[in-house]
Image: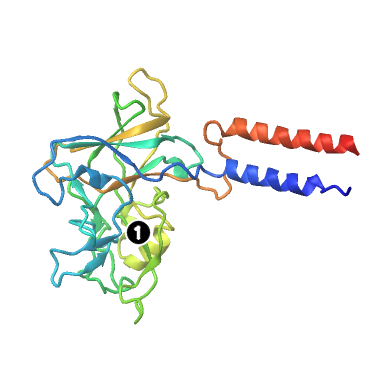
Amino acid sequence: MPRTPLKPVLSSLAALTLLALLTPSAHAQTFADTLVSSSGLGSNGLYNNPSATLGQPATLINGIFDVPQAIYHVSMGYAPYATDPGGNNVITSLGTSGTVTVKFTTPIVHSDQHWFGDDFIVFGNSFFSTSSGVTPTTNMANTLINGSGGIFQNGTPLISVSADGISFVTLAASTWYPTNPFAWAGISASNPSGWNDSQLMDFTRPVNPALSSGAFAGVSVATAANSLYNGSAGGAAFSLAGVTDGSGNPLNSIQYIRFSGDGSGGTNNIDAVSRVGFASTTPTATPEPGTGAMLLVGLAGVGVLRRRRYARG
């Protein structure tokens, strides 16, 4: 009886196994998914919902304080606030001493192969001042970022991390690049906003830290979004490299992130937090815990099957 050749099947199996195991874990959630605790938030119902820090950063805003009221695209020239078009809160204000603690079910593990060696990104509601006011149909190709390119933010929230949810370490402040979820596509009759709604920028890719805020001065919002951000959706990026716990041990894996007011009296606004992705589309990083053994078992099984095939002649 003719035998089905095993080699093509096994080669395909090995290739699929390697592809699956060397790709960053698909099941690892991108954004914080659990609210652990909160305290000291204000009384404004638009900004005192700690659950607003979970999930994806805001992309569209119901401009309830603008005339005429309309739906706005979040951009580096128009910071998120109030609610999204569905009426959901998008920003949590920590005030002077409020705190919110969130958790990632899948730990964030430091890797030098993450973008720029960073490991997670916090999104607030910072923005650049621009040469003209922003409306839902402003031409961002003609709208320039003002002055020295200074980033405006009402307070700089303190960011602390923990592996166990008990002992926290506060990290050094980062540059809070404004959130910019979309690429600029250009205004047209079919696209009056000018933003590309069909594809979001990458919430897991930090802005190049070599870019100072001054690099944005005099640049159009469209150019800054498409070129300077280079695929990133903005945010403040943090790395666990060199971070140690209270006993001096490396803290290279965390699950808990705490946001705290910085005591300045500012609003200290938080929108969301994401993990950072690998900088390569074909990463050589160590697979997720447990997958290394699976890889060895899988390849060993392939080898056994191939040896059995050849033994049979």
Query: On the picture, is 26 further left or further right than 271?
Result: right
**Relative depth, front residue between 160 and 217:** 160
The image shows residue 84 at horizontal and vertical percentages of 23, 59
Please, which residue is most extreme toward the left here? Answer: 43
Query: On the picture, is 231 further left or further right than 87?
Result: right
Please, which residue is most extreme toward the bottom here? Answer: 189
**Relative depth, front residue between 88 and 209:** 88
> In this figure, what is the number of numbered marks?
1
The answer to whether residue 122 shows anywhere in this view is no
152 over 303 or under it: above or below: below
The image shows residue 175 at horizontal and vertical percentages of 31, 46
Query: What residue would you read off at disc 1?
Result: 181
Please, what is the three-letter code of the amino acid marked with disc 1?
Pro
The image shows residue 42 at horizontal and vertical percentages of 10, 43
Q: Residue at x 49, y 38 (%)?
A: 112
Please, which residue is most extreme toward the front here? Answer: 1
Quadrant containing the C terminus in the rendered view? top right
Q: Residue at x 89, y 36 (%)?
A: 312
The answer to whether residue 89 shows anywhere in this view is yes
The image shows residue 260 at horizontal and vertical percentages of 21, 36
Q: Residue at x 36, y 37 (%)?
A: 104
Q: Secondary structure at mark 1?
A: loop
> In terms of image quadrants, where is residue 193?
bottom left
Query: On the picture, is 151 further left or further right than 6?
Result: left
